[in-house]
Image (cartoon, helix red, strand yellow):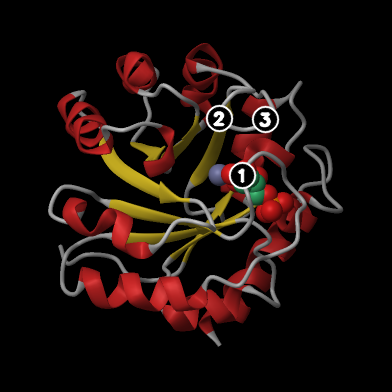
Amino acid sequence: MSFDRSIKIAPSILSADFANFGAECEAIEAQGADWVHVDVMDGHFVPNITFGPATCAAIRPHIKTVMDVHLMIAPVDPYIEAFAKAGADIITAHVEAGPHIHRTVQAIRGAGAKAGVALNPGTPAAAVAELLDMVDLVLVMTVNPGFGGQKFIDMTAKVRALRAMIGDRPIHIEIDGGVDPTTAPLVAAAGADVLVAGSAVFRGGSVTDPAPYGANIRAIRAAAEA
Ligand code: DX5
Ligand code: ZN
């Protein structure tokens, strides 16, 4: 099968009801999510704490699509095995999280998961140039990581540069932060194919009233595909 470059919407459960992750994952998938984006924060690499591998393992049975784990932690390497065992399909680590991102990518692949590398807004595309033959995804942060609901930072020039660097390689470009129907078209036009959205997906809905999730996902997808 050829590599899927179509637009994929990946709701971030950072904006879900933390007391109800299982039901929230099922609700967003039923409403059209392509992937489920799972934000792991350690209060050290980023100024916020979410959850770890045990929570990922607990929600895994409630995800039928792709469990896309975004690690905002430092160090990364001691925890890779645990997140792989928790069932992560994709594990993404930040290039800024330590001096040995190449080793981290090797370890993620070695643990049996697909490997992603993430770039903070202040980090140039060139930081992943030597990794492109060994990764499955490059994540471009369009906010400084740590919190949902922040204002989109325009990284379209970086996305275009990455798209050119990637060429024909089977590598997804994922955008994370401030994605909504107004910003999605900018990054899609620049070459991104996976759009993470937290507040723009979960706003207005709940597990007992999930229809707004579907409307929000469709609105982002339609804007990106227009
Ligand atoms: C930020 C996280 C994002 C965040 C996006 O550090 O990595 O995934 O949840 O949230 P929104 O879409 O609300 O900007
Ligand atoms: Zn994220």
Question: Quick check: can you spot residue 28?
Answer: no
* Dot in front, 3 or 2: 2
Mark 2 beta carbon near ligand 1 (under 8 Å)? no
Label 3 – label 2 distance at C-alpha: 29 Å
Question: Quick check: can you spot residue 124?
Answer: yes
- In the image, 39 versus 207, the foreground residue is 39
Q: Residue at x 76, y 47 (%)?
A: 210
Q: Hey, what amino acid is under mark 3?
A: Ala
The crowd level at tag 1 (other Cα within 10 Å; few <14, some 14-19, many 20+) is many
Q: Hey, what amino acid is under mark 1?
A: Pro
Q: What residue is shown with label 3? A: 23
Label 1 – label 3 distance at C-alpha: 25 Å
* Dot in front, 1 or 3: 1
Q: In the figure, residue 5 lies in which quadrant?
A: bottom left
Mark 1 beta carbon near ligand 1 (under 8 Å)? yes
- Residue 19 position in % (x across, y down): 76, 21
Q: Which mark is residue 45?
A: 2
Q: Is there CB contact under 8 Å for labels 1 and 2?
A: yes
The crowd level at tag 2 (other Cα within 10 Å; few <14, some 14-19, many 20+) is some
